[in-house]
Image (cartoon, rainbow, N blue to C red):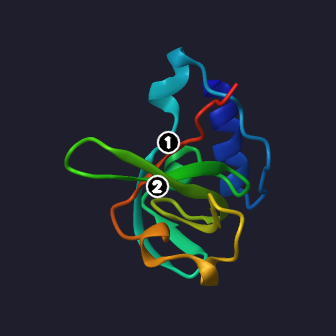
Amino acid sequence: MRSTLVVCRVLALAGIGMSFVPAATAADEKHVARGKVIYATGDAVEVNFGIDAGIAPGTVFEVVRTDGAGSVTLLGTVEITRAYPKSAIANFKPKRGVPVAKLDRQELPRQDDVIRPVSRRD
């Protein structure tokens, strides 16, 4: 897993995007990037991690919102479209299969929402 992330990082630095995202195991969990939304507008989301964390275009993450009581709400997913050393730009895909323009305000990503690896739903 670690070597795959290194290859992804090298290719991303060379400007070669990869759409392959290796599945993480429990042992690899510490190497899987996670972070927060820096900024969101429409279906564009900026996240606070990037190439330095092994991210490349095509990588998919979940967007969740947590509250003070420990409740977690899945908002949808983001797919990285551009990666920079410390941040990345992604397209948001809502949990409900509707256009972003039809979502309620609370269903849209906002600053400090959590970006995490996609949960397995087997």
Per the image, the residue denoted by label 2 is 49
Query: What is the residue that sits farthest to the left in this orientation?
Result: 68
Residue 49: give x, y in percent of width and height.
46, 55
Front-most of residues 88 and 44? 44
Q: Residue 70 in the image: x percent, y percent?
A: 26, 41
Q: Residue at x 33, y 62 (%)?
A: 112
Q: Amino acid at mark 1?
A: Ala
Q: Position of residue 18 (x, y in %)?
A: 78, 50
In this picture, residue 74 sits left or right of residue 2: left
The quadrant holding residue 84 is: bottom right
Percent across and percent down for residue 118 are: 60, 40
> Is residue 111 placed above or below 63 in the rendered structure?
below
**Under tag 1, what secondary structure?**
loop
Q: Quadrant of the N terminus?
A: top right
Q: CA distance from mark 2 to mark 1?
A: 7 Å
The residue sitting at 70% across, 58% down in the picture is 57
* Three-letter code for the amino acid on which mark 2 is drawn: Phe
Q: Earlier in the sequence, mark 2 or mark 1?
A: 1
Identify the residue at image location x=66%, y=30%: 121
Local crowd size for mark 1, using a 10 Å CA cut-off: few (<14), some (14–19), many (≥20)? some
Quarter holding the C terminus is top right
Task: Relative to 114, say whether 24 is above or below.
Answer: above
Which of these two is toward me, 72 or 33?
Answer: 72
Task: Report whether residue 116 is seen.
Answer: yes
Does 10 sit above or below residue 81? above
Residue 109: in sight, yes or no?
no
- Please rate how many residues cluster around mark 2, counting C-alpha atoms within 10 Å: few if below 14, some from 14 to 19, many from 20: many
Check residue 33 in the rendering and tell me which mark sits there, or answer none.
1
Q: Nearer the viewer, residue 121 or 6?
A: 121
Would you say the residues marked 2 and 1 are in contact, meaning their CB atoms lie under 8 Å apart?
Answer: yes
